[in-house]
Amino acid sequence: MTGIDETFATKAAPSTGAARPAEVPPAAPKTGKPADEGRSVHPDAIAAVMAASHGDAFSVLGPHQVGPKAWEVRAVLPEAKAATLLVGDARIPFERRHPDGFFVAKVPAEGRPLYEIEAESWDGQKRRRYDPYSFGSSLEQHDVNALREVGTNVVYRVLGAQAGKLDGIDGFRFAVWAPNARRVSVVGEFNDWDGRRHPMRLWQDGGIWELFVPGLKAGATYKYEVRGPDGALLPLKADPVAFAAQQPPETASVLHGLGEPAWHDAAWMESRGQKDPRHSAISIYEVHLGSWARVPDEGNRYLTYKELAARLIPYVKEMGFTHIELLPITEHPFDGSWGYQPVSLFAPTSRFGSPDDFVHFVNAAHEAGIGILLDWVPGHFPLDAHGLGQFDGTHLYEHADPRQGFHQDWGTYIYNFGRTEVATFLAANARFWLEHYHLDGLRVDAVASMLYLDYSRRAGEWIPNQYGGNENLDAIHFLRKTNEATYSHAPGTMTVAEESTSWPGVSHPTYTGGLGFGFKWNMGWMHDTLQFISKEPIHRRYHHHDLTFGLLYAFSENFILPLSHDEVVHGKGSMLGKMPGDRWQKFANLRAYYGFMWGHPGKKLLFMGGEFGQEREWNHNQSLDWHLLDDPLHAGVKDVIRDLNHLYVSTPALYSRDVEPAGFQWLVADDQDNSVIAWARKGKQPNEVAIVVSNFTPVVREGYRIGVPAGGFYREAFNSDAAVYGGSNVGNMGGLHAEAGESHGQGHSLCLRLPPLATMIFVLEA
């Protein structure tokens, strides 16, 4: 899949509403006399073109037959003192028809002439070029039609700046959806940002403006100059389907020949397609690339994609995580949005390098056996003037009514999911990251805000749906179609919903009435368990239900347990800072909590810094505090996460039946007085058993008996109180044999020594 055609085929635009191609002369009237015979371009048309107000530039510019064997070639060359038309060996001087640079050359020719233009600048420099207005349209009608089919990838195959050949000439074809604009021009450094130079052709039935500009090279910057339906010029717009962008604070799009990247991950892609993520070990390291690490001796600059490939990937591999989830890296103007207010949804942010550098990063991850997830933001977009808002002078991408089209919480626009072209644009973007960049999944941001029309709104501030309810029926349809498209075309990938309500079936298939996501963040589990662990141990007996309540619904969805960036910002402090007690107890609580989480049903997600007990709240403007690893207690937390991950991925009982009630069994659920909790995790084979026991008080529990579902030797595979982690080293001598006899409804039992503020995981040896 390349995303573009190497060679564009010149197509005559159909008569069903599309503009007539420049190379096709007007039909002759019944007299047989050519329609334009003896007539040159009208001065009013010249004036409109030079005022950049003409809506059909191809009817004026380029080659036009004006009589039998008589043609005119018309060009806008504001920079030219003089110009010459080059037709074969002939050199025909242009006549200046407008002082600002409108030129006309008369050409005797049987048919449409093939030519170049040589422009002489005022300083005497001469430059030859092909004329964009000598080329016909290269769009296909079926592609224009497909822009109304939610789930296709035609958006990024057709729109944007596509590199290719037309009539054997290299260049870029620009295409942009702006159905209500009076005129759209491509502007850039190649034409001095002059909207008179490259006005585009309109396909009226699809609202697509397009133009092939020969001779352009990758790396050039560009935008669109749009004249709205009222005739007013809008602020210059970045390309909605730009594949690269300037580094903020600059805002232009950048030409990028989006060919097939140089992939080295065939083995990964093949194996990925054969896996069911629901039954796989998934432990996700959530990363903000701009603050994972910086280069302090070089002005505190970011690491590049290539530097991150060399440093972040080996670290994640060592730590045993299976996936990296990137906070949004789609191009965004404001660092402080962390990427959640994107403008160019198809462009990897240039903060860390080029699109090719990003490919290098993904290749490195896949070669190391690590998947990459992208935090994807289809729920809202910012008000920046160069962005999608009022794109063609109307509410094109967003709703016109602020009760539907404006997020009060974030000060952003809301996409109009009911407009088919908008839904197609977003769904194609989801496919783009999975197909073109080989990403392994999308975490979809703020799904709840999309599902509910009254999200964060008071009475009277929202508009009910057609049935009088608060469900956003258009968003529901969009999400279902997007999930169907991604799972159909990118095998082995997953979509994950950040959805915090009780909406039913978020991660259920669409054919059963679900939304079709693969997974859902378990926000309730996160909230309840953090509330529990933040309490002083003496008070935890009164909050024991916060530990157990999540198991009432743990298998109603395919859950991921998230300890994300949202829990360490906006005054919430760090994960370590949430823990009560003195310094030793804080670290012990954190280690115990992580052990509890890794033993609990559900895939895992941890934000960077949490794996070594970052002490301060996350700051996106500076690196994590890696120097803390010189402290044995911080290093101990890091080792806990590393060992939990490696135990997790090597123990099917801990992951293979995450989404099935049969994979979980309570052993001790009601010992609130001692704040002890225990359960069994079961794999698909009878001998795949793991026992998880947590003691959330600082009291050592001697001779604590729990029932277990099978006899045999239970290896103490993890103990968060081990001395190597900074604990007090209370344990069970590496494991013990189960004793026959009933306990807790089981036929065997273990008599354990429970360490203080600790979690242990025992694995049944085969």
Image (cartoon, helix red, strand yellow):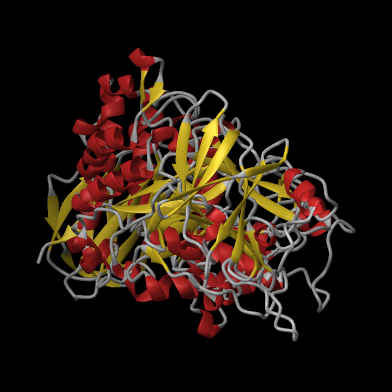
Tell me what residue is drawn at x 52 percent, y 61 percent: 135
Would you place residue 19 above or below residue 389 in this image?
Answer: below
Residue 703 appears in view: no
**Furthest residue to the right?**
460
Q: How many marks?
A: 0
Residue 409: % across, % down: 72, 45
Tell me what residue is drawn at x 73 percent, y 44 percent: 50
Would you place residue 763 above or below residue 224 in this image?
Answer: below
Would you say 171 lies left or right of 237 here? left
**Residue toward you, 612 or 64:** 64
Q: Quadrant of the N terminus?
A: bottom left
Would you say 490 lies left or right of 154 here? left
Residue 679 appears in view: yes
Task: Kindly indicate the quadrant of the structure image that contains residue 203.
Answer: bottom right
Tell me what residue is drawn at x 71 percent, y 50 percent: 413
**Residue toward you, 625 or 377:** 377
Residue 196: % across, % down: 67, 44
Would you place residue 288 above or below residue 412 in this image?
Answer: above
**Residue toward you, 566 or 644:** 566
Residue 544: % across, % down: 51, 51
Task: Kindly indicate the quadrant of the structure image that contains residue 42.
Answer: bottom right
Would you say 737 lies left or right of 527 here? left
Q: Quadrant of the C terminus?
A: bottom left
**Residue toward you, 490 or 101:** 101
Residue 324: % across, % down: 34, 48
